[in-house]
Image: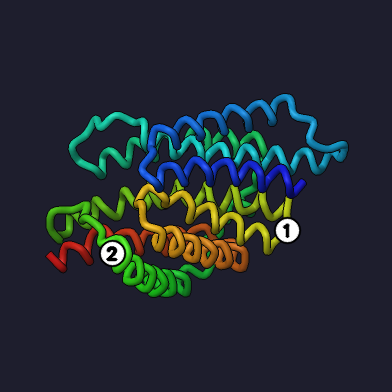
Amino acid sequence: MKKEIFLASLGIAVGEMNIFLGHTYSGIIIHIINLQILTLAIIFGRISSDVENVFHIKSVFQSLLLLLLLRIVNIAMPQFFTNTLLWYSLIYGVMFLPIYYIVKNQRITIEELGMDFKRLHIYFPAALLIGTVAALFERGIINPIPLVENINISSILMLTIVMFIFVGAVEELIFRSILQTRLENALGLKSGILLSGALFGIMHSSYGILNEILFASIFGIILSFIFQKTRSFPFILLIHVSANVLLFGIFPTIST
């Protein structure tokens, strides 16, 4: 069972490596091939004689399809808007449809998704702290271009809304609520954390910076560990959003 999952993950890594090296079209072609292979494996594959193993593997394959779709849509989506935030809203907004399908198809529960709003009075300040530390580290790696022209209430509010409703929500639903929980069922708790975190890092290959992949992998593992211990989607979402708002809004605008 592990072999099939690791091979599928390796296929995604190969596509992302091409994108990392600047071979974007080759990377997209590899991802499209990966998508077709995984789809056929889900429909026709007889991966194991054990029914439970087959279910777990195909659930992981479905989850990996979300990563491929997100990358393909991200690169292939035409630039309809000059405003980058609106473009992000379109790209990530499209992903809610396949996410909904997989959640419904696999009958993923509210508990597995992590929709627990308890202890937010503790998680909120902790999320701000963790997000700030992450943003400070990542700022030194990628030197981010600001997504807002200046710091004011309306621009920061707009950035926060996009990161909260679209970017952060979609990425955390895919990597933590869906992929991580499927990997935990198929491979175990530790492997679920490590592989979901590693894939989160690999999917940052478009920056073309090796240190960014390494940082994002470590950050992804930390988020996966926190999610496993708390099963709180709001907690990890707040961490992700606070890091992105600081990284792409406040920090670069202040420095300029």
- Whichever of labels 2 and 1 marks the residue nearer the N terminus, that label is 1
Q: Is residue 180 left or right of residue 71?
A: right
Question: Residue 8: percent from the left, percent from the top?
Answer: 63, 41
Q: Which residue does the numbered mark 2 point to in the structure image? A: 246
Q: Residue at x 28, y 64 (%)?
A: 246
Residue on which the image places disc 1: 188
The amino acid sitting under disc 1 is: Gly
Question: Residue at image x 80%, y 31%?
Answer: 46
Between 28 and 48, the one lying in front of the other is: 28
- Location of residue 151 with respect to 137 vertically, above or below: above
Residue at 35% from the left image edge and 71% from the top image edge: 137
* Quadrant that contains the C terminus: bottom left
Q: Amino acid at mark 2?
A: Leu
Q: Pointer 2: residues within 10 angstroms few (<14), some, or many (20+)?
A: many
62, 229: nearer the viewer: 62
Question: Is any atom of residue 115 visible in this view?
Answer: no
